[in-house]
Image: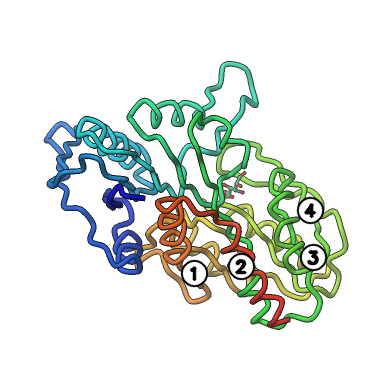
Amino acid sequence: MKEQCKLVAGSSNIELARKVAKIMDMPLMPVDLKKFNDGELYCRILESVRGSDVYILQPTSPDVNDNLMELLIISDALKRSSPYNITAVVPYFGYCRQDKKHKSREPITAKLVANMMMVSGINRLITFDLHAAPVQGFFDIPSDNLEVMPLFADYVVDKKFEDIVVVSPDAGGVPRARALAKELDVPIAIIDKRRPKPNVAEVMHVIGDVEGKTALIVDDIIDTGGSVVAGSEMLLKHGAKEVYVFASHALFSKDAKEKLGNSPIKEVVVTDTISISEEKRFDKLKVMCVDNLLAEAITRTHQGKPMGVVYDDMREKIQQKR
Ligand code: R5P
């Protein structure tokens, strides 16, 4: 492809953007990002992007509204500067959990955000472990939803657990639990979770056999930590030997650090799609880096090559270890 590949980062996870740029042996484009006194954001791209294949690295993590607006404003600035293509690389997609109406007169924010991204000029999207895969259908542009399960499976295989059950913390997470169970060739169990109000999780039942097993709860997001902590307590009550938690996106809001740190969970494994400050870290937290996967996805998108072979290679390595 003759169009030059260029990377630009918003401010939401600059560490991850720098790592990706380093792996790709490319600089991040200089960009002037400022906030006016009234809170409005300003952006100017400080080099030409005419005819270039441009990738914006910006998870829309907290502060979700500012980071989303920053992504849209960067895209708008690019769109008006005649690039060949604008791809948004959004490893964590804020507002994605509101992907359907549960009650009348509610919004579908995932669709609203998809529309806003497309209007801003984004014409390709790379995400990572979306809350629900069908959200890709909210976009009328090409999209790639990168997989986390080979990364988690590789980590689990290294742990050499004897008897594993993969647990979904709620009904919505079953496809995710199935995906990890398939990588590991183990059974699944499901927690019946209810939400009496936002950010409050109540565990009702456990469906499946967890007795004497190492239970791996797998979720997309840890927000307040309520779901996985209540789930782990319930699994231990049902006779699980120990509980590990795997989640792609570490929001860690409110008192999540204390809740997770004081819980019976043995280890909390997350990725760095969201920048995790030192204050939010705790002893049993393990952070896996997605820099290589993102760099590979950007390179392959730029070169017009498929991603499937990357996962095939990862899976082959996992098989060799088992
Ligand atoms: C919800 O459907 C998500 O997949 C997560 O389970 C949820 O966001 C976790 O929230 P919290 O950590 O506050 O229980």
Q: Earlier in the sequence, mark 3 or mark 1?
A: 3
Looking at numbered disc 1 in the image, what kind of residue is underneath it? Met
Marker disc for residue 288:
1
Q: Which residue is mark 2?
A: 152
Foreground: disc 1 or disc 4:
1
Give the secondary structure at mark 4. Answer: strand
User: How far apart are the two marked residues, 4 and 2, measured between alpha carbons?
Assistant: 19 Å
Foreground: disc 4 or disc 2:
2
Pick the quarter of the image with the C terminus. bottom right
Q: Earlier in the sequence, mark 3 or mark 4?
A: 4
Q: Is mark 1 within 8 Å of ligand 1?
A: no
User: How far apart are the two marked residues, 2 and 3, measured between alpha carbons?
Assistant: 25 Å
Answer few, some or many: residues within 10 Å of disc 3's Cα (few below 14, many 20 plus, some between 14 and 19): few
Marker disc for residue 237:
3
Task: Tell me, yes or no, if residue 252 can be seen here.
Answer: no
Q: Residue at x 35, y 62 (%)?
A: 16
Q: Earlier in the sequence, mark 2 or mark 1?
A: 2
Q: Which residue is mark 4?
A: 190
Looking at numbered disc 4 in the image, what kind of residue is underneath it? Ile
